[in-house]
Image (spheres, grey):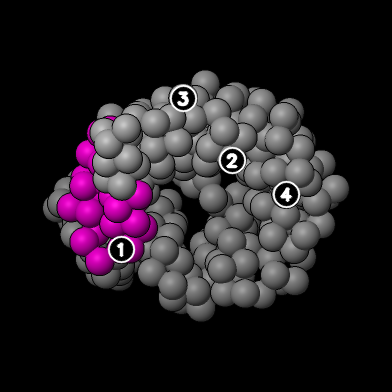
């Protein structure tokens, strides 16, 4: 789910006079910025310290509650996350992220009916909030209600056409509908907006593999590996090379994938197949 910018939260907290005088900046950073924490538990401790320190005003407590609720949610402590979102709403009934975060916590907890009810009520009050349509569209898609999922994703795009995640979510809906052409079109737009997102590239690469566009798939896996090498990109790029008959490149990628995860059988299978195919070509 799209969330409030951690940089915005951090700057807002650090520039607040009461914060500057009562708590060290390192505590504020660990609460507001996930990049500064060592663990989710560390973020929870930092935010709790902010919340419980006397003298913090309403805005400061709200920001700390948001940070802690998000950490609880990301750690799977959904009831605690919901409690913090409730506290946020009590402090500020107009805080959109509290309502959206609470709905997402209910979704992750498995209470889809409650999540849907929360999103429906929120959209009635805030009918131009793109994130609400995005989140409800994702929920409809998970429930198999594809027409409503498509309508909500399209509305999210209309409201916020520069959001790559909305285009990606609609691509997933089109894929569920079996419409590969529209899936590829929306994936292309998502990648234009966020060229280095590995999930967008991976999904398109896999779809191109299925359509036997191995060169196109290799281009997407190349980009993933350039930004941050990962196991699955090496495996599937290796298979794309294999299907193109480039067995040396397939062997190299299989070996790289094995170095990432020595216990996974898939790259070892690729390695055996590529070595055998190379041996057959050399014996001719």
For mark 2, what is the residue? 210
Q: Secondary structure at mark 2?
A: helix
Select label 4 or label 3 by which is in front.
3
Contact, CB < 8 Å: mark 4 with mark 2? no
The residue shown at (70%, 43%) is 175
Region in magenta: 248-274
Residue 281, picture quadrant: top left
Residue 215, labelled with which disc?
Answer: 3
Pick the front one: 111 or 140: 140
Q: Residues within 10 Å of mark 4 (few under 14, many from 20)?
A: some
Q: Residues within 10 Å of mark 3 (few under 14, many from 20)?
A: some
First reached walking from the N terminus: tag 3 or tag 2? 2
Alpha carbon separation for disc pair 1 and 2: 22 Å
For mark 4, what is the residue? 176
Alpha carbon separation for disc pair 3 and 1: 25 Å
Contact, CB < 8 Å: mark 3 with mark 2? no
Q: Position of residue 73 (x, y in %)?
A: 45, 66
């Amino acid at each position: 789910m799209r969330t409030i910018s951690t940089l915005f939260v951090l700057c807002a907290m650090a520039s607040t006079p009461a914060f500057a005088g009562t708590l060290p900046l390192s505590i504020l950073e660990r609460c507001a910025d996930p990049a500064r924490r060592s663990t989710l538990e560390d973020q929870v401790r930092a935010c709790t310290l902010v919340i419980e320190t006397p003298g913090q005003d309403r805005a400061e407590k709200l920001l700390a509650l948001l940070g802690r609720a998000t950490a609880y949610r990301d750690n799977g402590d959904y009831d605690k996350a919901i409690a913090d979102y409730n506290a946020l709403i009590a402090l500020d009934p107009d805080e959109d992220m509290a309502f959206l975060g609470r709905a997402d916590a209910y979704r992750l907890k498995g209470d889809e009916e409650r999540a849907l009810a929360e999103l429906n009520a929120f959209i009635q009050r805030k009918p131009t909030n793109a994130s609400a349509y995005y989140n409800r569209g994702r929920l409809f898609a998970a429930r198999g209600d594809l027409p409503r999922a498509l309508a909500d994703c399209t509305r999210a795009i209309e409201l916020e056409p520069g959001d790559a995640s909305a285009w990606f979510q609609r691509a997933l809906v089109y894929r569920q509908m079996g419409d590969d052409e529209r899936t590829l079109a929306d994936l292309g737009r998502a990648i234009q907006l966020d060229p280095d997102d590995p999930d967008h590239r991976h999904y398109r690469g896999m779809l191109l593999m299925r359509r036997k566009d191995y060169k196109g798939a290799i281009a997407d896996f190349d980009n993933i590996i350039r930004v941050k090498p990962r196991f699955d990109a090496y495996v599937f790029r290796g298979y794309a090379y294999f299907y193109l008959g480039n067995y040396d490149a397939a062997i190299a990628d299989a070996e790289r994938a094995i170095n990432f995860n020595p216990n996974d059988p898939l790259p070892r299978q690729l390695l055996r197949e590529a070595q055998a195919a190379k041996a057959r070509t050399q014996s001719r």
